[in-house]
Amino acid sequence: MANIKQQKKRIRITARERMENLRYRSTAKTLAKRLQSAVDAGEADRVAQEHRELVRWLDKSAARGVIHRNTVARRKASAARLVARSGS
């Protein structure tokens, strides 16, 4: 347990940042699942909207350093392939 004031502050800050990073990662997964369900349903306009939102969220995550940029590129490419196969 930290007993120095700055250490206690760092612990609070790190916990807050960890929760925010978790939110970014979790939301990216949720958006990917939504895109998959839209593709399965065959709704072209919803596919385009979900894809746009997923790419936007992944770019934000990469800019913040939450997800590594190569991982983001891989996920975006995977989403693009999914959209292309859907015929949208």
Image (cartoon, rainbow, N blue to C red):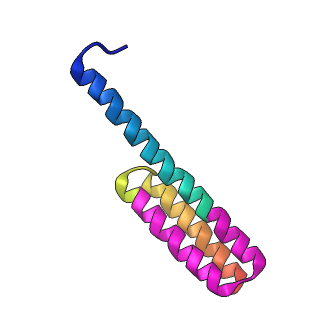
Q: Quadrant of the N terminus?
A: top left
Q: Quadrant of the C terminus?
A: bottom right
Q: Is residue 85 above or below residue 21?
A: below
Q: Is residue 19 magenta?
A: no
User: At x 54% / y 57%, what residue is drawn?
Assistant: 27
Q: How many numbered marks appear?
A: 0
| Image quadrant in which you'd find residue 50 | bottom right
Instruction: Tell me if residue 41 is in the magenta stretch.
Output: yes
**85 horizontally vs 21: left or right:** right
Asked whether, in this view, residue 53 is left or right of residue 38, the answer is left
Q: In the rendering, at what x and y percent does residue 32 appear?
A: 62, 64
Q: Which one is in front, 15 or 57?
A: 15
Percent x, y of residue 38 = 70, 75
The residues colored magenta run: 32-61
Asked if one can make out residue 88 in the rendered structure from this viewpoint, the answer is no
- In the orientation shown, which residue stands out farthest toward the right? 41
What is the x, y in percent for residue 49? Answer: 56, 79
| Residue at image location 36% in from the left, 34% down from the top | 14
Image height check: is 72 above or below 8?
Answer: below
Q: Position of residue 18 (x, y in %)?
A: 43, 39
The residue lying at 60 percent from left, 57 percent from top is 29
Using the image as rendered, state which of residue 37 and residue 68 is in the foreground.
37
Task: Determine the residue positioned at 75% across, 82% down.
Answer: 42
Compared across the picture, whether 62 is left or right of 48 comes to left
| Residue 54 appearing in the image | yes
Above or below, 10 against 32 in this view is above
Q: Main secondary structure of the magenta part?
A: helix
